[in-house]
């Protein structure tokens, strides 16, 4: 049995049960144990047996599904895709190989990978109609809604009824066309002509070429930049049931197709508390630099309970230790800036800010550490990516994770449409009052 299948077979219902007492009822509920020892109480029978539901705003304590894709240990700062450490994948794999791993559950054979790369390479072009589609949008449109709208519009070009084969084609098209959409959005903002994808470039080099080449002169893609971009995509590729992934699952659970589900995920990722934070982090560093470079004033605002300011790139719902991606990116920042012979005051500000918070009880007591967004923006800047395209880079990286999670949801034996409950707190029944009596 393949290691993945063996691990899944071990994720069985535990022999334990949990007891819950509501009113005069005591209910024994089954306990589920994951392959890494995580325990959950299955409350599926709760409402039927007791009339009660549970309440958990933000779902901080609620498992939405069983999943075999990504494992996070927030206390130990561990992140693995299908059991493989992200540090090893970032160092030794490629983004497309990691995408295959996330979607199929095992590392590809050479033939599988070669065929996958060829399929993706040959589907990078967008229908020419998308030029008019994008041209209709304002020049200063943010690239995230442009990407969400374009991905949603892909449905109108590929309308065949949903089948295993049509889903396979949609996966290839989405992974292949996302960099083209991102590059076109950037060129649209510059008023420059779109640069077509090329089949002689690898995945990340193609994106860089489409973003920065012009028809006026040859453009040489720096292999250091391409390799750093590929590693960044790997580090962002999946992260279990985060906000945008849960959005993709929920939309897909209504039987909305993959393009519509991914479009919704892109919109959710744009939020400043989620993927949009990487843009806010660099804007925060720039504000600190404009203020003289001392982060103390900004940190004081972030700690003030009456001030909504947050230290962007800090804190995490799951990690109560250093986000392993941030740890990797902090080192990668230095390497990329050295290799490109780039110095960036913002990196010094980032390191200074981190040093202060690691000693500050406010952050230490709340276990607030740098997350994936804290250093990624500094690297994107060094690679020449415009700041409002940082979250688009996040979306390109997260796409295979969204796809893998969507497929797992659709193949889940417990599959049903997502439909949370509520506790009603509004007005009780009352009669309508005509205007003259109000
Ligand atoms: C991503 O879920 C994922 O996996 C997401 C992600 C992925 O790969 O998909 O990892 C990507 O979205 C990373 C997070 C990027 N967002 C930011 O960097 C924005 C800044 N961070 C915060 O807004 C916050 O930490 C969240 C949103 C990330 C987490 O919010 P939670 O879990 O709801 O935590 P909370 O708001 O309940 O905070 C707990 C306490 C509060 O203080 P008290 O009420 O206890 O006094 O910590 C404080 C918060 O005020 N706090 C912060 C803070 N984050 C939390 N205070 C200052 N600055 C911060 N950044």
Image (cartoon, rainbow, N blue to C red):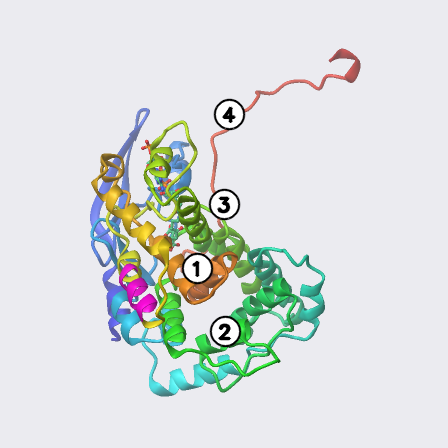
Ligand 1 closer than 8 Å to the CB at disc 1? no
Q: Earlier in the sequence, mark 2 or mark 3?
A: 2
* SS class, disc 3: loop
- Among all residues in the image, which is located at the extreme right? 436
Which residue is under mark 2? Answer: 207
> Of circles 2 and 3, which is in front?
2
> Of circles 2 and 4, which is in front?
2
Which residue is under mark 4? Answer: 425
Along the line of sight, the residue nearer the viewer: 163 or 288:
288
Q: How far apart are the alpha carbons under marks 1 and 4?
A: 32 Å
Along the line of sight, the residue nearer the viewer: 50 or 228:
228
In the image: residue 17, left or right of residue 223: left
Q: Is residue 333 magenta?
A: yes
> What span is in magenta?
330-338
Q: Mark 4 Cα within 10 Å, few/some/many (few <14, many 20+)?
A: few
Mark 1 and 4 residues: CB-CB less than 8 Å, in contact? Answer: no
Mark 2 and 1 residues: CB-CB less than 8 Å, in contact? Answer: no
Q: Mark 2 Cα within 10 Å, few/some/many (few <14, many 20+)?
A: many
Q: How far apart are the alpha carbons under marks 3 and 1?
A: 14 Å
Residue 143 in picture, x, y percent from top left: 57, 59
Residue 321 in picture, x, y percent from top left: 23, 48
């Amino acid at each position: 049995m393949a290691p993945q299948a063996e691990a899944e077979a071990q994720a069985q219902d535990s022999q334990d049960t949990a007891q819950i007492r509501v009113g005069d009822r005591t209910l024994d509920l089954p306990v589920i144990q994951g392959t890494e020892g995580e325990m959950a109480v299955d409350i599926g029978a709760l409402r039927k047996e007791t009339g009660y539901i549970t309440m958990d705003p933000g779902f901080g304590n609620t498992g939405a599904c069983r999943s075999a894709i990504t494992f996070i240990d927030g206390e130990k700062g561990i992140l693995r895709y299908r059991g493989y450490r992200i540090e090893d994948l970032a160092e030794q794999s490629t983004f497309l190989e990691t995408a295959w791993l996330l979607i199929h559950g095992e590392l590809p054979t050479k033939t599988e990978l070669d065929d996958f790369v060829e399929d993706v390479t040959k589907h990078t072009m967008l229908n020419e109609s998308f030029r008019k589609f994008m041209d209709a949008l304002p020049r200063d449109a943010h690239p995230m809604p442009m990407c969400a709208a374009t991905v949603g519009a892909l449905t109108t070009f590929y309308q065949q009824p949903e089948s295993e084969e049509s889903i396979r084609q949609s996966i290839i098209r989405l992974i292949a066309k996302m960099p083209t959409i991102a590059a076109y959005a950037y060129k649209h903002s510059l008023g420059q002509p779109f640069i077509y994808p090329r089949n002689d470039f690898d995945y990340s080099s193609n994106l860089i070429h489409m973003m920065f080449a012009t028809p006026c002169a040859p453009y040489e893609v720096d292999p250091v930049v391409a390799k750093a971009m590929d590693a960044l995509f790997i580090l962002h590729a999946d992260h279990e049931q985060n906000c945008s992934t849960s959005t993709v699952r929920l939309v897909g659970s209504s039987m909305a197709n993959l393009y519509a589900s991914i479009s919704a995920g892109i919109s959710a990722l744009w939020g400043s508390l989620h993927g949009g934070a990487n843009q806010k982090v660099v804007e925060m560093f720039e504000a600190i630099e404009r203020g003289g470079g001392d982060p103390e004033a900004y940190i004081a605002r972030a700690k003030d309970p009456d001030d909504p300011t947050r230290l962007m790139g800090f804190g995490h719902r799951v990690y109560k230790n250093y986000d392993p991606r941030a740890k990797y990116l902090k080192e990668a920042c230095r390497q990329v800036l050295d290799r490109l012979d780039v110095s960036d005051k913002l990196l010094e500000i980032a390191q200074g800010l981190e040093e202060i918070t690691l000693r500050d009880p406010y952050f230490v007591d709340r276990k607030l550490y740098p997350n994936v967004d804290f250093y990624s923006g500094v690297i994107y800047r060094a690679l020449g990516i415009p700041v409002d395209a940082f979250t688009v880079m996040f979306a390109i990286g997260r796409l295979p994770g969204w796809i893998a999670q969507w497929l797992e949801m659709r193949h889940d034996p417990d599959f049903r449409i997502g439909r949370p409950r509520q506790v009603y707190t509004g007005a009780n029944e009352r009669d309508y009052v005509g205007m003259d009596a109000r």
